Image (cartoon, coloured by chain):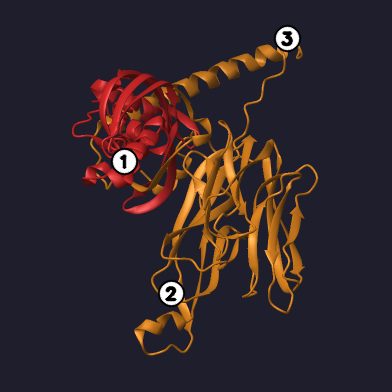
Chain colours: A orange, B red
Amino acid sequence: MNPLVVLSLLAVNATAPSAPVQVHIHTAQVQVAASGAVQEFTVDCRPGESVLSGGFRHTAPELRVLGSYPSATKAGWVVSAVQPARAPADLTLTVVCAVGEIRSAVRVATGEKLSASTRCPEGSVVTGGGYSSSNAAFVSSYPAVGEGWAVTAAALPGNEVPNLSVYAVCASGSVRPAGAGLETLDVAVSSQSPCPVTPAASAACVFGRSGVKEVACEGQLVGGGFEVAEGQLPPFAISGAAVARDAWRVTVDGRSSDNRPLSLRVIAICVLFPERVTDGPPVGRKPVSEREEILPIIASSCLVAALLLALILVMSARMRSRPRRGQQAQVSVALRSHHSSFRLDEFREVR
Amino acid sequence: MTTVRELVFGDHAGEVQAAERFAHDVSIAGAAVSAVSQALDFEVSDVVVWAWKTRSALLEAARETHATPGLVREVTVKTYALPWDYEMHLDVLINGTRSATVKFVLSIALEITALAATVQNGRLTGLAAGRCKTSALLQAEGRMLAQREVSFELPAEVKVGDGIALIPDAVSSPDDQSSPASRS
């Protein structure tokens, strides 16, 4: 099985794309004041458009992006950030919007743990997602199996109880999932401060960690995510995660005392906008003679379609029963973490 | 002895059904449900005892009898209920590369009635009576995969043996310390 299909496990297969829906990308340049306070910025979709995803990018080393998420009140994308440095920082916001036979809804889940996920309703397609927190640094924000969105974060010193919100943009209407693009970004050590010679004092070293990856996918690119695959991402090191031209682009630029291998999975989400099967005009609206002319054409088209369908079914049944010659993807599942708890608030005992 | 795996899925057909509910892709769904099934290969009685160790009249009796050597407490409880949630995060690996993470949540509701037990030296040393109704619900990313309910007699299900430590101070063997989550 193609690994790119994993993320649309629960989805139906799409048909050939056409264009009842148009996708537009809007950007906004803002400046984050050097106030040390959390500031929120929004880039809106145009009237009549639905939000599909969004993101941000910047080149300010000190800037801390605390949230990048769909607006819950209007079609748009919100980015919240703090600039602790003395100079203001430039920040670019991006929102991906669509107009046509499509609508989107935002699902939000909030918790006090370092990971959270939310799921789109059945029949809808996840096109993007995001996160926000005032006291945790995000390390992963990605589409999860089961058509939802998942985020993980790292606690910041002095914030044992993080607040965390995860957002999923769920689209419905004339939209089908088309799988995802998936590539690994190996985050290199880009620089190194002078280090003490003794290994015991190696924590005093500061390593620059940076890298960039653009991932494309088949279909209409609408959004994407990122997930730490190996190592520890320095806090607020994601300096860009947004649609750029025809690819989902994730940029890492941070500093850490850790020079061990660090890699991210960068995931691009693509969808298809199949033509909807429209109901024909009610019988009787056209003159009888015209209907009589169309009926044989419809009947023959149906016959051809039925024959083609039967042929496809027979072929696919044969393919399934035949042993595969080529390499098959090896699927395995591993328990990553687990925890349990009793719901003490529902405790009852009568002696 | 009933395992949580049996409680949740029943037999193999239950696992197949759960896999079908989870995803259309047979290989991934099967592998995921199989991994969950393995993770649930511990006994329901472990969860029951762990619940008692968390909050119960038995726990109070254990503290009391441990503080007073020689004291034996006969504890009777008309009804007892404490739900338990077990969250598992599974990585789906394609050709060795992690492609996605799925969250499974198992919720077990324990409802015990007419419990009669003996506690001494901080340990549960006898179970004369008690019936436990357990209902399990397994979900993946919010989607229900399996739901079952099983009832059993506690004296038959919980093997008391030389006694089960209910407080850390009464632990005499490593088995006494483990919890269902740490074993799986």
Cα separation, mark 1 vs mark 3, equals: 95 Å
Label 2 chain ID: A
Q: Residue at coordinates 69% horizontally, 71% vertically from top-left?
A: A83
Image marks 1 and 2: residues in contact by CB distance under 8 Å = no
The image position of residue B37, as x and y in percent, is 31, 34
Q: Residue at x 63, y 74 (%)?
A: A62
Q: State the separation of the CA atoms marked 3 and 2.
A: 79 Å
Nearer-N-terminus badge (3/2): 2
Viewed as shown, does residue A220 lie left or right of A334?
right
Q: Residues within 10 Å of mark 3 (few under 14, many from 20)?
A: few
For label 3, the residue is A288
Residues at discs 3 and 2 in contact (Cβ within 8 Å): no
Secondary structure of the residue carrying numbered label 1: helix
User: From the viewer's perspective, is the residue at label 1 or at label 2 nearer?
Assistant: 1
Q: Is residue A244 above or below residue B166?
A: below
Q: Amino acid at mark 1?
A: His
Residue B113 screen position, x and y as percent: 39, 18
Q: Nearer the viewer, mark 1 or mark 3?
A: 1
Quadrant, the C terminus of chain A: top left
Q: Position of residue A210 (x, y in %)?
A: 51, 73
Query: Is any part of residue A105 visible from this angle?
Result: yes
Q: According to the image, label 2 marks what residue?
A: A258
Near-viewer residue (A12 or A310): A12
Quadrant of image for the N terminus of chain A: top left
What crowding class fits label 2: few (fewer than 14 Cα within 10 Å), some (14-19), or many (20 or more)? Answer: many
